[in-house]
Amino acid sequence: MKKITLLILIFSSLTSFSQSIETITEKISNKICECIKDDLKSYSEIKPEFNRCYDKEFNFIFDLVDSEEHKILVKDGNLNKVKNGIIPYLNDNCEKIRTLIQSELDNSVEPVAETVKNPCPTNFSGKDLKKIKKRNGEIVAFNGLVTKVYAVQNEKPYYEVKLEGGNTIWIASLVKSGYEIKDNIIRVLGYVSEVGKNEFAKKHNKTDFHILAFCVIDMKTKQMAMLPGSELQIKEWMNGKIPTAEK
């Protein structure tokens, strides 16, 4: 009984610690989002504006936290964990940034669809799964029918799709698009990657590989969601070419 109690206490402590890091990240990210100007017109304006607000707000992070959170922040590595979580949080939750990203996509997709013969092509299907190990690290694009969906950290979806040909593959999404709904047909662009030591993935995915998706298209609405920072790769894809992974 003592061992069980100790394990419960340890687990509760770890869970509380993780939640504290997320809470601190949310606090500073919301301050940065508030600081960002409301009248930005294009996606290219986000980076300099983010840098300005980051410099302004992050220097006062210790003024935002309570005494317990202060103790957590000063421990080795925790300040960096908060830093690394700011951009993903803003991409998902700061409406000013989300609106500009979607506007950038909307302004790019329509003209391309009218002028390019085969925008956003595919190069992967169910039959290619037999050789997936050889394609590790490559960028692939394919259509899939969503069959199972789970939520992971920051509500990013981890989901299974049925490929053309009947086989299935798992997707570890780098974007939260909202298109990952069971029985929905999507087009995915992402890297072939080994599951490795990802415990959440291994719990559901019984294969050695999954796809790290950085762009998703809802095939019904033709709406697109992408990982900020991948604009050049997405535009290359929209112009009819599968992007090449950087070596």
Image (cartoon, helix red, strand yellow):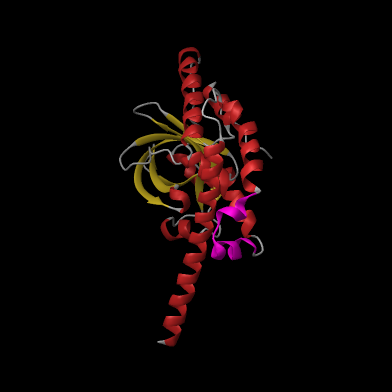
Up the image or down, 144 lies above or below 157; here it is above
The N terminus sits in image quarter: bottom left
The residue at the far bottom in this view is 1
- Is 66 inside the magenta-drawn segment? yes
Report the magenta residues as a range: 60-74
Between 238 and 161, the residue placed more toward the observer is 238
Quick one: 106 or 23, which is closer to the camera? 23
Question: In the depicted view, which residue is nearer to us: 58 or 231?
Answer: 58
Residue 156, percent across and down?
45, 47
Q: Is residue 151 above or below residue 53?
A: below
Image height check: is 151 above or below 226?
below
Residue shown at 50% from the left, 12% from the top? 115
Per the picture, the main secondary structure of the magenta-coloured stretch is helix
Q: Position of residue 173 (x, y in %)?
A: 48, 44
Q: Residue at x 61, y 52 (%)?
A: 61
Quarter of the figure that contains the C terminus: top right
**Residue 211 shown in magenta:** no
Q: Residue at x 49, y 25 (%)?
A: 105
Please give left or right for residue 172 compared with residue 83 in the image.
left
